Image (spheres, grey):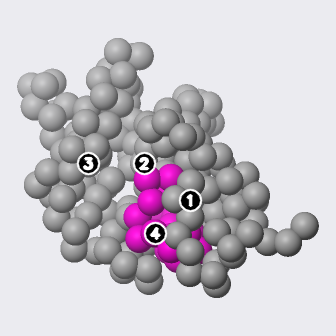
Amino acid sequence: MPETPAADPTAGVPLPHPTWRFLLAHPAHFIALGAGAGLSRFAPGTAGTLWAWVAFLLLEPLLTPPGWALLIGASTLVGWWACTVTARHMHIADSGHIVWDEVVAFWLVLWLVSPTDFWGQLAAFLIFRLFDMVKVGPMAWADQTFKGFGPRGGFGILLDDFAAAFCTLIVIALWRV
């Protein structure tokens, strides 16, 4: 079966909605699209954040604080590469279907607010999603300043979500005072 132009990274045709075929065509796509969470046709960023929450719950009993720091650090570096490659192959500077940025940033939030119960995690989820969707202040600056298809653009994909994580953590810290 011939390759469709939308799935061909050299074709120059934007790929507004990635497919399973695209997801599996390159390891960077699999990572950047959150192992399939980014394929959601409805709110892929929310789907990616939910995926991050479930993964956090599964990994939490297995990882120590240094383990979490290592996982988040390594996931950021690998994600930078994966988001850069996937954005270039999709021909979209920051597709909403690229969700690895939500995954790593929300892991950071959950790790830093732990220990907390379900309601605390739900509050963190809702606050993070609000900041990530609204893109005001530092999120808007990061989103607008680091657009593109090279490493700078891949970094920008991650940076606006880390800014949303930072703002989420500030709100939670003020709430806990």
Query: Picture coordinates of residue 130 (x, y %)?
Result: 25, 36
Say which amino acid is labelled 1.
Ala
Q: Quadrant of the C terminus?
A: top left
Q: Name the residue under label 4.
A: 92
**Alpha carbon distance from label 3 to label 1:** 18 Å
**Alpha carbon distance from label 4 to label 3:** 21 Å
Q: Is residue 69 visible?
A: no
Q: What stretch is highlighted in magenta?
A: 75-98
The answer to whether residue 134 is left or right of residue 106 is: left
Question: Quick one: label 2 or label 1, which is nearer the N terminus?
Answer: 1
Say which amino acid is labelled 2.
Glu
Question: Quick one: label 3 or label 1, which is nearer the N terminus?
Answer: 1
Magenta stretch: residue 122 in it?
Answer: no
Q: Is residue 150 visible?
A: yes
The answer to whether residue 131 is left or right of residue 72 is: left
Q: Give the residue drawn at x 33%, y 69%.
A: 156
Disc 2 on helix, strand or loop?
A: helix
**Alpha carbon distance from label 3 to label 2:** 9 Å
Disc 4 on helix, strand or loop?
A: loop
Question: Quick one: label 4 or label 3, which is nearer the N terminus?
Answer: 4
The crowding category of the residue bearing disc 3, from other C-alpha atoms within 10 Å (few below 14, some 14 to 19, many at least 20), is many
Disc 3 on helix, strand or loop?
A: helix
The crowding category of the residue bearing disc 4, from other C-alpha atoms within 10 Å (few below 14, some 14 to 19, many at least 20), is some
The answer to whether residue 114 is left or right of residue 56 is: left
Q: Which picture quadrant has residue 137?
A: bottom left
User: In this orientation, which residue lies closer to the viewer: 176 or 84?
Assistant: 84
